[in-house]
Amino acid sequence: MQHTIGIRLEDKNEWERRVPLTPQHVKKLIDEHSLIVKVQSSPIRAFSDSAYGDVGADVVARIDDVPVVFAVKEIPDEELNHGQVYICFAHVIKAQEENMPTLKKMMDLDCTLIDHEKIADSNGQRLVFFGFHAGLAGMIETLWAMGQKYKFDGFSTPFENVLHAHEYPDLAAVRQSLVNISDAIKKDGIPEELAPLVVGFSGYGNVSKGAQDVLSALPLTEITPEDLLKLKENKNYSRHTAYKVVFKEEHTVRPVDHNSEFNLKEYFSEPGKYESNFEQYLNHISTLVNCIYWTPDNPDLITLDWLKNAWAEKPHKLSVIGDISCDINGAIQSTTYATTPGEPVYTYDVKKGESKVGIHKGGPLMMTVDNLPCELPRESSTSFGTALYPFVNAIASADFWVSWEELDLPLEIKNAIILYNGKLTKDYAYLQEIVDKL
């Protein structure tokens, strides 16, 4: 028996050109598993309709009749169909208010929902993600922001030559551009007024690894958070290198009970027992790249009160914040809204307590694009699809109308099922109370 899957067009916004499976992945599915693949036609997708047609997919206007639909972003309410299985980033597991009506409609239509975000191994490590590419694109955008901010403030730096991530044809072009910038830093250095140039990373997971990968193309000296506190004081820094500092939880928080020692396991399970310990480093950082996973239970990294005090008399050393995590009013309290690749930055005016699009005086420049991987759509889709591919045939072949106990799927996928035939699965039953209030 041949099984059929669909690949939905992405219509979240004009920048969303990613795909869950590239033409090469589709070719393998057809050749190795004899799947029928229907691809919904899209005018903006990074891979053309003809590229899918050339490998044997059926390019169609609608996929309403396809039993299993793969996508990247959320499915609009008006595109939901009775009994369909959807595999996408649903953004519901934190009870995100804007997506609860969609979850309710899926329940009413007896849909099954598999969330990419919850596909994980037995240790809880995510298997299918765009995080690394979010880091890549986020660091490129942050370097662009640095160049433009320094230029606005009257300093000429090689970072002025960095383009937006989406303006490069591919990652190879990015890396070549950074080689040229690296050579300029080695030769001419950073203006004395900006030295030492310190880029701090909060977090060390996939997002941070991607961001650090981009920065590694520059002349770079890695130092510890402890060394950072003494770097300028010792006057042994160089203008011909950038300094990288990676902050882990042990640097960003401390126990509320100062007589207790930091315990990572305890922090993860009981974050309320901890408070921020990050402000001691902020006076020494030029640019902060935020890559942490944050919830409202976790302490903040940068508060509005700190920003107001830091910028009270003159511009502060920390002039650019690349918030790749982009939790609104979250770990970085000056992250007041998500920007787009078309307008990636705003200035947070610390005195007025408001955000102004573009580069201005009076506060740090914020880069808060929330769909960064779409700026590198071909590379990020290829990586994502390669991680998803091993599970696709099992999903396509599964009988989603048997009982939950009889459902035969890899455990990594079964644990990622939010809804099964319109009913919340055990791990996500906590969402029922929110849905009931709609």
Image (cartoon, rainbow, N blue to C red):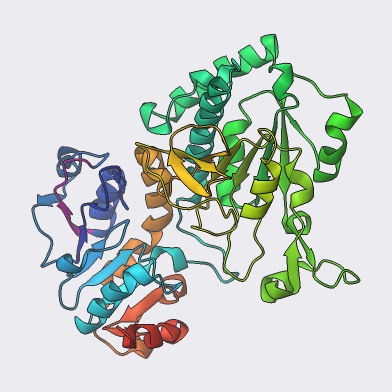
Image height check: is 131 above or below 264? above
- Residue 95 is left or right of residue 314, and the answer is left
Q: Is residue 303 visible?
A: no
Q: Quadrant of residue 243?
A: top right
> Which residue occupies the foreground of this view, 74 or 13?
13
| Residue at image point 26% right, 59% down | 33
Q: Which quadrant, please, contains the C terminus?
A: bottom left
Q: Which quadrant, please, contains the N terminus?
A: bottom left
| Residue at image point 40% right, 48% down | 371
- Specify start and end residues of the magenta stretch as a single range: 34-44
Q: Position of residue 319 (x, y in %)?
A: 62, 35
| Residue at image point 34% right, 36% down | 342
Q: Position of residue 256 (x, y in %)?
A: 80, 71
Q: Quadrant of residue 358?
A: top left
Q: Position of residue 335 (x, y in %)?
A: 51, 51
Q: Position of residue 326 (x, y in %)?
A: 50, 52
- Residue 187 is left or right of residue 321, and the answer is right
- Residue 436 is left or right of residue 307, and the answer is left
Image height check: is 329 above or below 420? above
Q: Is residue 338 visible?
A: yes
> Which residue occupies the foreground of this view, 84 or 251?
251
Image height check: is 348 above or below 141? below
| Residue at image point 55% right, 42% down | 322
Does the segment drawn in magenta span residue 438? no
